[in-house]
Each structure stands twice: as C-alpha cells, then as structure tokens.
Amino acid sequence: MNDTVIDKLLKMGVDCKEVYEHKEVREVLYKSTFDWLYDLADWSNFVTLTFREYRYPDVALSLWHKLVKILNVNALGKHYNRVVGESYFSYVLGIEYTKNDIIHFHVITDSSLNYKLVHKTWQELAGFVWIDQIKNKTNVLKYVTKYFLKAKNGGDLLVYIAKNNMIKNKVRHWN
C-alpha cells in the first residue's frame, strides 16, 4: 500500500501540528482544494468584501448572511427560502485577515448578482466592495485557493451549493 505524504511524515515522527507546514502537504492540499472548487459550480462572479474596522468573525459572518438574505429577497421575494433554501446562488466564501487582523472576504458565486445592491448594502453594513465577472476561472480559483491555504493553520471556507438550479434561469441578470 502506498503511504500518503502525511503518513510518511507521521511515521518519521513529525508532530501532527507541524505536518501542515511541510511543502509537500501544502501542495497536496492546494491541488485537492483547487480541483474540488473547480468542479463544484460554474463560477461567474468574484467579490471582495472589506470591513472598515475590526469585527469578530461571528459578527462578520452574520453581516455576510444578511447581505445574502437581502440579495435573495430582492431577486425572489420575502419567501425565497421556501423555494431555494439559503440562497438562489451557490458561493464559496474565503475568510482572510489583513496585517492589522481585520477580516475581509473573497467570495465566488455562480449566478447573477445585483451589483448595485451589493455595493449599496455592503457599504452601509460594513465597508467596501470589489466585484468582477470571472473571465478566467482557473486564475480566480488559484487565487482563492492560495488565500485559503495561506493562513498558518489553513484558512476558512464557507461553502453553499444552491439547491434549485431551475431558479437561476428565472432570476434577473443584473450584470
């Protein structure tokens, strides 16, 4: 049986906490994360959301969920969750910290977003927004994967896959 890179390191007596720091392990994690994200959805938007000031992670995530809710209500009405669950669009949200320990989010989505509403809402709630349509899926996913793995103990990814793909055809295209 072939040992994985992790198995070999552990057999060599490397402490579990130190395994993540090994280049070979990080390369395996990078490749598997990239491949998984690539096949997960047809990503179309790359969004960066910043915060003006420090927010605890749970507060920052609650602001993200508030934005998602506002976008869904705008697109499908206040009872959207009966049809699509949490959201009409799939997303991967990567959490990154600046040098000042302030969170910002990198988000990829697979459906049309109301860019004006995203900007207006996020500026009122938290900070600044940059949105680009994804032209090169490979480059964007390399970037997201890099920042996910950049953190010392790995980054945080919040993944949601939309349950009802039929709805995407009924949502207005704002882009």
Image: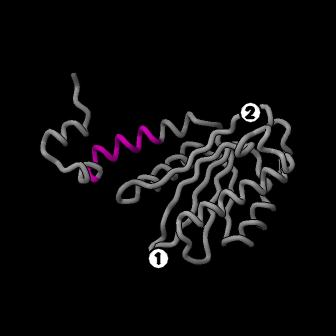
Q: Nearer the viewer, residue 51 or 45?
A: 51
Which residue is located at x 14 percent, y 39 percent? 11
Q: Nearer the viewer, residue 153 or 135?
A: 153
Whole-percent x and y of residue 123? 72, 71
Q: Which mark is residue 100?
A: 1
Residue 145 coordinates in the image, percent (x, y): 48, 49
The N terminus lies in which quarter of the figure?
top left
Local crowd at mark 2 within 10 Å, few (<14), some, or many (≥20)? Answer: some
In the picture provided, is 9 more to the left or to the right than 134? Answer: left
Q: Crowdedness of circle 1 by 10 Å Cα count: few (<14), some, many (20+)?
A: few
**Which residue is at a point 70% across and 45% down the rendered structure image?**
86
* Disc 2 secondary structure class: helix
Inspect the image, locate mark 1, and give the three-letter code of the amino acid beneath it.
Asn
Quarter-wise, where is residue 85 in the image?
top right
- Pointer 2: what residue? 165
Q: Residue at x 74, y 72 (%)?
A: 124
Magenta range is 21-33
Q: Amino acid at mark 2?
A: Asn
The location of residue 98, given as percent across then percent down, is: 48, 70
